[in-house]
Image (cartoon, rainbow, N blue to C red):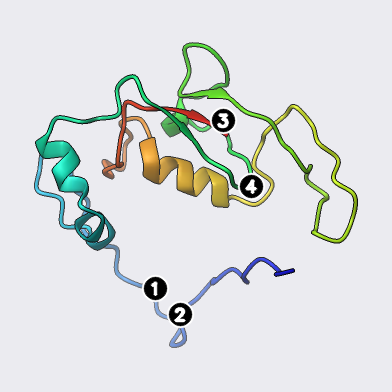
Amino acid sequence: MYSPPATLITTLDGAIPEVAPLHRLSMIDEYAPHVIGGVEKLYAEGNTGEGILIAVIDTGVDYNHPALGGGFGPRHKIVKGYDVVGDSYRGNNIPSPKSDLMDCNGHGTHVSAIIGADPNPFNFITVVPNATLGI
């Protein structure tokens, strides 16, 4: 059994870290995790995730977030989902499943956005922006 990691709210010296420059999908992607993962190969092949459903098993998702389609169900980015343990589950108690898959931690929303957020004001590159997601 593991506890979730503590949230980092400052750096050791108290300074705010610099934010890496943002890139558009049509530009060269220099974001290190994308380079290591070979995301540019997907882009070179024209693969944007169109017609692909990706399952994300995590802490849920904020399906109301505009970068994730702003809703849940048909005609949205998040098309399927179910909370299999409930928000109060800690690993040592009885799960309380529920149909609402709203994120109770933030991690699932973060991961879902990395995978396939819609175009957004921050212009960050996602791996497969046209994929649909099941949570």
Q: CA distance from mark 2 to mark 3?
A: 30 Å
Q: Residue furthest right?
A: 94
Where 39 falls versus 52 (above or below)? below
Residue carrying label 4: 59
Residue carrying label 2: 11
Q: CA distance from mark 3 to mark 1?
A: 29 Å
Which disc number belongs to residue 82?
none
Which of pointers 4 and 2 lies earlier in the amino acid sequence? Answer: 2
Which of pointers 2 and 1 lies earlier in the amino acid sequence? Answer: 2
Residue carrying label 1: 16
Q: CA distance from mark 4 to mark 1?
A: 27 Å
Q: Secondary structure at mark 2?
A: loop
Q: Residues within 10 Å of mark 4 (few under 14, many from 20)?
A: many
Q: CA distance from mark 4 to mark 3?
A: 12 Å
Locate residue 97 relative to residue 8 in the image: left or right: right
Locate residue 131 relative to residue 96 in the image: left or right: left
Which of pointers 4 and 1 lies earlier in the amino acid sequence? Answer: 1
Amino acid carrying label 2: it is Thr
Amino acid carrying label 4: it is Thr
Q: CA distance from mark 4 to mark 2?
A: 25 Å
Q: Residues within 10 Å of mark 2 (few under 14, many from 20)?
A: few
- Is there a contact, CB below 8 Å, between mark 2 and mark 1? yes
Percent of width and height locating residue 19 = 29, 63
Percent of width and height locating residue 69 = 46, 24
Percent of width and height locating residue 26 = 11, 37
